[in-house]
């Protein structure tokens, strides 16, 4: 029990350790700390072959992103217990479950005020993920440890950047919500989300 709390201390805000531990115990789920995944921050798997349900959360998330992702996936578990697969994944049932789980954590003892403001905006829609909410995602990313990568919206126009696959682009200009960029090798233009994380490149290094 004490060892498990010690593990949680590495991943969630200090004042969230005990309530997160209690939620795991009360809902009889296993929490798995997963490697970094490009396509998702976490997931929920229902019980199989006599094993309890499992929630996984990527290990590299900052404490606030980790907590929000955990609550997101636990809401899926709560919906599964009642409805199994008979409702939409992020339908009204999930939204109600997520809100019910999130509300006890909405205080400045757990979240910084700038994140709390994005979670408690009046008439705010419950998003399926923190990355779907640009304003919330922007605040969460400010608390990431590694800053080698930056968001495209933070680069000036005409700046160069590369992706993890080594392709180099030039940021051109904004089109509505997204940014038009030119890949240098093939001269093709691509559209990127303002929240896309890229690695800045100096002109002399291209």
Image (cartoon, helix red, strand yellow):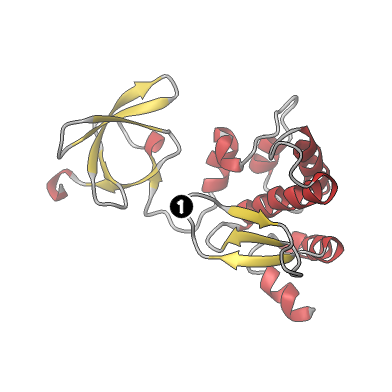
Q: How many marks?
A: 1
Q: Tell me the residue that label 1 is attached to.
A: 38
In the figure, is residue 187 to the left or right of 101? left
Q: Nearer the viewer, residue 95 or 125?
A: 95
Does the rendering let one see residue 76? yes
How far from the left and from the top, in percent, is residue 41? 56, 52
How far from the left and from the top, in percent, is residue 154? 39, 37
Label 1: few (<14), some (14–19) or many (≥20) C-alpha neighbours in 10 Å: few
Quadrant in which the N terminus appears = bottom right
What residue is drawn where x is 15% and y is 50%? 205
What residue is drawn where x is 40% and y is 34%? 153
In the figure, is residue 182 to the left or right of 71? left
How far from the left and from the top, in percent, is residue 126? 70, 34
What residue is drawn where x is 24% and y is 51%? 166
Q: Quadrant of residue 155?
A: top left
What residue is drawn where x is 75% and y is 24%? 123
Q: Is residue 85 above or below residue 181?
A: below
Q: Nearer the viewer, residue 52 or 136?
A: 52
How far from the left and from the top, in percent, is residue 7? 67, 73
Does the rendering let one see residue 108? no
Badge 1 element:
loop
Q: Quadrant of residue 186?
A: top left
Q: Is residue 91 above or below residue 52?
A: above
Q: Nearer the viewer, residue 6 or 44?
A: 44
Q: Is residue 109 above or below residue 155?
A: below
Q: Quadrant of residue 182?
A: top left
Q: Is residue 67 above or below residue 154?
A: below
In the figure, is residue 193 to the left or right of 98? left
Residue furthest toward the top? 176
């Amino acid at each position: 029990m004490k060892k498990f709390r010690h593990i949680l201390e590495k991943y969630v805000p200090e004042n969230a350790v005990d309530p997160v531990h209690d939620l795991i115990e009360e809902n009889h789920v296993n929490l798995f700390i997963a490697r970094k995944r490009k396509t998702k921050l976490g997931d929920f798997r229902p019980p199989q072959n006599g094993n309890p349900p499992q929630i996984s959360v990527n290990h590299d998330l900052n404490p606030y992103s980790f907590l929000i992702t955990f609550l997101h996936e636990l809401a899926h578990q709560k919906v599964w217990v009642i409805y199994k697969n008979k409702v939409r994944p992020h339908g009204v049932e999930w939204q109600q479950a997520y809100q019910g789980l999130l509300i006890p954590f909405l205080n400045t003892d757990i979240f910084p005020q700038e994140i709390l403001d994005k979670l408690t905006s009046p008439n705010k829609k419950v998003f399926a993920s923190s990355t779907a909410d640009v304003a919330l995602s922007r605040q969460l990313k400010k608390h990431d440890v590694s800053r080698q990568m930056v968001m495209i919206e933070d680069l000036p126009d005409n700046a160069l950047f590369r992706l993890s696959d080594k392709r180099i682009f030039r940021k051109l200009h904004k089109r509505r919500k997204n940014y038009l960029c030119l890949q240098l090798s093939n001269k093709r233009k691509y559209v990127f989300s303002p929240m896309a994380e890229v690695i800045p490149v100096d002109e002399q290094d291209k």
